[in-house]
Image (cartoon, helix red, strand yellow):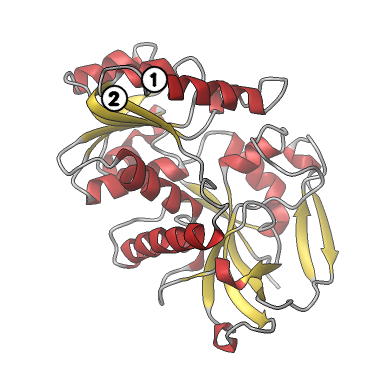
């Protein structure tokens, strides 16, 4: 029997529903995973508004990633997986006490790593790693700007950049500036009306990379921060999450703008990071995901990454957890864990 949190439609967080159902035995190539930690990400905040770019039709179970223990394996799955801990990126479905997953999507968790701590670097860690090392390819000694430096992806980006010898300027509210400094970056108030002037004062020759999850009109200001050879990586449209209308239009408009900038003769480049790009070739996509997540989990296990857990809350309190995440008062990631028995 599994307990699931259901998003029935465009509702407030209090509109989330709880259901229980019997989970069938895993089919060939699949496993049953007992959830030990899952997270509240920006994707769920967009999904409840119907604003995530390619979300499924309502109703569905949210939950972008998960860490847990395999408790059953279907035909063709190595039985040695049973009893071992794994992480998986699910996109939806992880807000559940037990999940049915494809065994090929699981990535092993190093021994001794706490499940909630590992959860903070699953989708956030892969996203940050790929944007920094596969897209922007910033070299040691470079300088980057991270918008939303106190968030799950932002705080992971700060630490990966520090480990790679890269200087970081991070935007955040003043209440989070001590955290940003502790993670090795120079903080700037994101609400400062002269935000981009402040950043230029810190990097008068421009920067090598900007990581922007906000989108909207200010994306042009992010583009202008780049020096020749620099890269803008856009990975969200937070600025338009509350706007009415088609959820895909702001993203498509952003795609068009970024694509056009790449044709300008100024030596700069711009990309929209899509976590699921390349998944039409599942074997290649899974191999890349496994390699990148394994790198991040090893950095976590070796102490090079400090997990940023804003709160640990039981699965049954998913509505309160989503409300807290949307309050923009916390740093790091809110993690859902199993309810106490």
| Residue 200 relative to residue 131: left or right | left
SS of the residue under disc 2: loop
Q: Mark 2 points at which residue?
A: 268
Residue 184, compared with residue 203, is above or below; it is below
- Corner quadrant of residue 262: top left
Residue 320 visible in image:
yes
Q: Mark 1 points at which residue?
A: 261
Mark found first going from the N terminus, 1 or 2: 1
Identify the residue at horizontal 49%, vertical 14% (top origin).
217
**How many callouts does the rendering have?**
2
Residue toward you, 283 or 335? 283
- Percent across and percent down for residue 247 are 68, 28
SS of the residue under disc 1: helix
Contact between marks 1 and 2 (CB within 8 A): the answer is yes
Residue 23, compared with residue 247, is above or below; it is below
Residue 222, compared with residue 288, is above or below; it is above
Spatial separation of the CA atoms under disc 1 and disc 2: 8 Å
- Percent across and percent down for residue 246 are 71, 24
- The quadrant of the picture occupied by the C terminus is bottom right
Residue toward you, 263 or 31? 263
- Percent across and percent down for residue 236 are 52, 32
- Density class for disc 2 (Cα within 10 Å; few <14, some 14-19, many ≥20) is many
Residue toward you, 125 or 309? 125
């Amino acid at each position: 029997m599994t307990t699931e949190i259901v998003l029935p439609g465009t509702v407030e967080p209090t509109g989330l529903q709880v259901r229980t159902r019997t989970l069938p035995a895993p089919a060939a190539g699949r496993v049953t995973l007992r959830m030990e930690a899952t997270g509240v990400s920006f994707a769920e905040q967009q999904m409840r508004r119907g604003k995530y770019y390619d979300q499924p039709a309502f109703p569905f179970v949210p939950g972008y990633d998960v860490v847990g223990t395999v408790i059953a394996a279907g035909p063709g799955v190595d039985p040695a997986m049973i009893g071992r801990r794994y992480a998986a990126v699910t996109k939806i479905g992880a807000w559940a006490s037990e999940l049915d997953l494809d065994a090929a999507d699981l990535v092993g968790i190093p021994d001794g790593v706490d499940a909630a701590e590992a959860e903070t670097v699953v989708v956030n860690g892969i996203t940050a790693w790929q944007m920094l090392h596969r897209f922007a390819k910033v070299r040691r000694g470079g300088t980057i700007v991270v918008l939303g430096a106190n968030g799950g992806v932002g705080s992971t980006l700060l630490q990966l950049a520090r480990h790679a010898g890269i200087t970081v300027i991070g935007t955040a509210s003043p209440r989070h500036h001590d955290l940003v400094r502790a993670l090795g970056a120079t903080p700037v108030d994101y609400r400062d009306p002269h935000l981009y002037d402040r950043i230029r004062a810190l990097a008068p020759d421009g920067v090598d990379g900007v990581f922007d999850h906000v989108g909207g009109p200010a994306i042009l200001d992010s583009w202008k921060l780049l020096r020749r050879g620099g890269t803008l990586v856009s990975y969200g449209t937070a600025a338009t999450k509350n706007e009415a209308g088609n959820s895909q239009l702001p993203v498509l408009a952003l795609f068009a703008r970024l694509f056009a900038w790449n044709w300008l003769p100024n030596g700069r480049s711009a990309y929209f990071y899509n976590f699921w790009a390349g998944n039409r070739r599942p074997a290649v996509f899974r191999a890349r995901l496994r390699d990148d997540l394994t790198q991040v989990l090893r950095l976590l296990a070796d102490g090079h990454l400090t997990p940023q857990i804003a709160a640990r809350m039981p699965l049954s309190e998913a509505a309160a957890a989503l409300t807290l995440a949307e309050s923009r008062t916390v740093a790091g990631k809110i993690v859902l864990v199993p309810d106490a028995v």
